[in-house]
Image (spheres, rainbow, N blue to C red):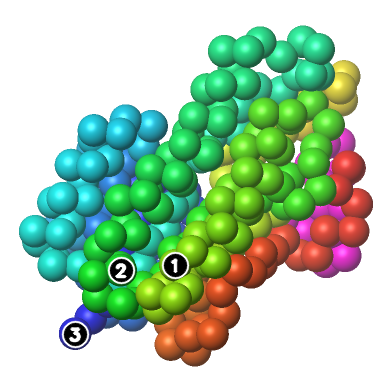
Amino acid sequence: MSQRVLITAGASGIGLAMAQAFADTGARVWVADVDPKALARCPDDWHVSRVDVTDEGGMRALFGEVARAWDGLDVLCANAGVSGVTARVDELALADWRACLSVNLDGAFLAAKFAAPLMRAQKSGTMILTSSTAGQYGYPNRAAYAAAKWGVIGLMKTLAMELGPDGIRANAICPGAVEGPRMEGVLAREAAAKGMTREEVYAGYASGTSMGRFIEARDIAAMAVFLGSDAARLVSGQVIAVDGHTVNPDP
């Protein structure tokens, strides 16, 4: 039987690249996203659901649908995330802090919470959580985002320990700077906050890696497919950066 793969925030960006990469292997794909327009653009043979990952009731219903349609789940990609505001910690509003943690960390928690019973029942499965290199090194002016992504890593490590005896693996992918609309927003905000041009901030990010370049969503998707495969059958509890090798986390 083909793999059953659920991806949160799977209708655009990294999530869409993951969905397409798994579909290319012959997997059955289920995309959950808050954006109805993006969902409408997904291929007709994918399952799609409009879901806010911070809504516990909505997430419970989503996984109930998955259980009824597929009678299990092989791969969860808990990918939903937001970049949050760019501000010094003393200028960061509590509401903005909470909003960032809610999507990035609560969303991953709820996805894992409701995927775990499906995987336990079949004694197999893998959870792939999208963290960030900001969750490895921290990042100035991005306190909420960095804290959330560190939290995702702690959640993943715990999932790997809790669920390993049931044959379930958990790993985290840490993307670096990814080409695309979200990163363009980050570049614009950081440029404004630092009094720099967008090009200067971009160059700083690129020079912060040994390979001197941004990565693409397909690079992250390829790692997700590997982690979901039998080739990674004993890879669990790992934090894997796909970032061109960060050498200076504060460009």
Q: Residues within 10 Å of mark 2 (few under 14, many from 20)?
A: some
Q: CA distance from mark 3 to mark 1?
A: 23 Å
Q: Amino acid at mark 1?
A: Leu
Q: Which mark is residue 1?
A: 3
Q: Position of residue 163 (x, y in %)?
A: 44, 67
Residue at 27%, 41% in the rendered image: 59
- Viewer-closest of 26 and 69: 69
Q: Amino acid at mark 2?
A: Arg
The residue at which mark 2 appears reads as 120
Q: Which mark is residue 133?
A: none
Q: Position of residue 80 (x, y in %)?
A: 45, 43
Magenta-highlighted residues: 200-219
Label 1 with label 2: CB-CB less than 8 Å: yes
Queried whether the magenta region covers residue 192, the answer comes back as no
Mark 3, mark 1: which one is toward the viewer? 1
Q: Is residue 64 visible?
A: yes
The residue at which mark 1 appears reads as 163
Image quadrant in which you'd find residue 237: bottom right
First along the sequence among labels 1 and 2: 2
On screen, residue 129 versus residue 149, left or right, reads left
Q: Position of residue 58 (x, y in %)?
A: 23, 35
